[in-house]
Amino acid sequence: MSKLPVILSGIILLSIIPFAFAEYEDTLVMLKTNSGDLVIEFFPNDAPNHVENFIKLSSNLKTELGEKMASNTALKYPSNSYENTLFHRVIPGFMIQGGDINTRENADDDSNWGHGNLGYFIKAEFNDIKHDRGIVSMARSPDPNSAGTQFFIVHQDSTFLDGQYTVFGRLVTQQSFETLDKIVALETGQRDIPVDRNAPKIIETLVLERSTVDDLLELDPPERTTDFRPDNLAQNTGRYVDEELGFSFFPPIGWAVSNPEQINKNSPQVAVLGPIGSPGIPAAFAVNVKDSTSTLDQHILDFKNMFLSAIDSGTMKIISEEYLEHAGFESYMIIFQQDFTSNQTTTPLKMKLLLIKTPNTLYSLQFTNSLAFYQTTEGQFDDILDSFTLKQRSSPIEKTTIQTTTTETESQSSEGGGCLIATAAYGSEMAPQVQFLREIRDNTVLQTQSGTSFMTAFNTFYYTFSPAVADYERENPVFKEAVKVGLTPLLTSLTILNYVDIDTEQEMLGYGIGIIMLNIGMYFVAPAIVIIAIKNRRRLF
């Protein structure tokens, strides 16, 4: 008899759970934005905690059902949290992301958008629902159990996300899909933030009963994947830690972590491969760690020198570069685009490289995907970067297996100076004028320490403006011809070096300073004298 109360309580509990699920199945949330309404239905059988969280975050006193939810103290999540937040990340063909409290609380400072939460996290409820158009899924950091308030709505089918994010709802009216398309069409700036920050703002949230909404679409059950296996969710869900190399990070769920064999000093020690977008090209993250006491600026110069020919020929284009700080250490980030050719097929790639310099180590982090699919994994790249931490290394890096292959690479990467502007002006890196500049650089200037030091300093200055000048040359034929004319005095002055023997540092300094002064005279002094003479002549009249 003593077991009867327990049995009865169990029966009551089992009867309440399906009732609660059924209640949520008949519950809708309307997000009213300045671009239109988004009406969402839910999948409580697949993600009960995420559904409960989202509905409570949307609830307020504006509807009877919303008031009931908002006042339900048994639900641990806060209410009325989404009003005046905005969809802060908009990527056409992929998704729109919202729910970040920082977009409301720190509306004038977008530097921390994408990182906001209310101080609690929900355990993952990954399921087999596909990320098709209109699906609502929960955003998270690399830690699978880090969902909070942020969510995203899929614009176009993105099934490579399946099983890695918790799907908990979908759009359910035609107007909702039209609103989704309007928000996706907004002009965006840095980090995919809409330029017009009023248009994607959520101005009101309503919790409604399904029976009160008239224009619901008759949708089939959500499409489900057959590849989903809950038993494999533990794979790659934890932090990857490398004690020897001194770093750790969270790999995205489903991405394969490997330790490829090092062919040379620039080969990655750790590689992480994600979904394949363009044929044969997966999203990839790679880490290379090497002992180094050189400065960060020297490593930046070495990197650019390695790709001089690609930059000069236009097959590699620098999109942006900046100095920053990561984990308390000086860092440098460059984003560039490069063509990749395989089996006579050329695919443009987009890459992000982060160099982190500690006193004795250089960490190189590279993110790569095809240009067409880069945006779809950029958020996961950023998550990896946010989770990437440095720690005390257990030992120096072994160099014996690759020592013999690095000498030639090091000598090549220490060479200076590209011919970016000249290559764009004359149309090819094989042009006689460009080859002449390279021969002077390699066979004369770089043969002395003073010449090498000059090229190192010159390159640091040169690359602050040369990519922009070269791009404009390619876009504007008139400007291109003007640059050709402007380069002629420089090329003429440099021919002097073909007729002299430079055997000492003093001779290099002497001829070098002489040519610099000659060019200053041709480009600045002579035009200034002409301008002054013209002004004086005008005064006489």
Image (tube, helix red, strand yellow):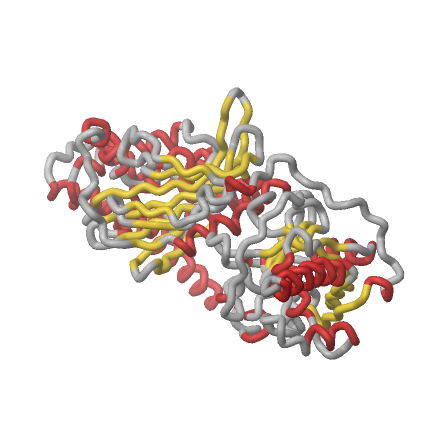
Specify whether residue 529 is in view: no
Indicate whether 36 appears above or below 162: below
- Identify whether 62 is placed above or below 350: below
Q: Nearer the viewer, residue 194 or 492?
A: 194
Q: Which residue is drawn at the image coordinates 18% and 43% (left, top)?
A: 396
| Residue 222 position in % (x across, y down) | 73, 45
Q: Is residue 143 visible?
A: yes
Against 295, is 158 above or below? above
**x, y (%) of residue 270?**
35, 39
Farthest-out residue, top = 343
* Residue depicted at 73% across the width and 75% down the height: 68
Which quarter of the rendering shows the N terminus? bottom right
x and y percentages locating residue 196 in the rendered image: 66, 65
Give the image location of residue 539, x and y in percent: 47, 68
**Which of 262 and 410 lies nearest the eye of the viewer?**
262
The answer to whether 29 appears left or right of 532 in the picture is right
Relative placement, left or right, of 294 versus 463 is left
Q: Is residue 221 left or right of residue 509?
A: right
Is residue 178 rendered to the left or right of residue 109? right
Rendered image quadrant of residue 6 = bottom right
The mark total stands at 0
Residue at 45% x, 33% y: name it: 313
Q: Nearer the viewer, residue 5 or 360?
A: 5
The extreme right residue here reads: 214
Residue 42 occupies quadrant? bottom right
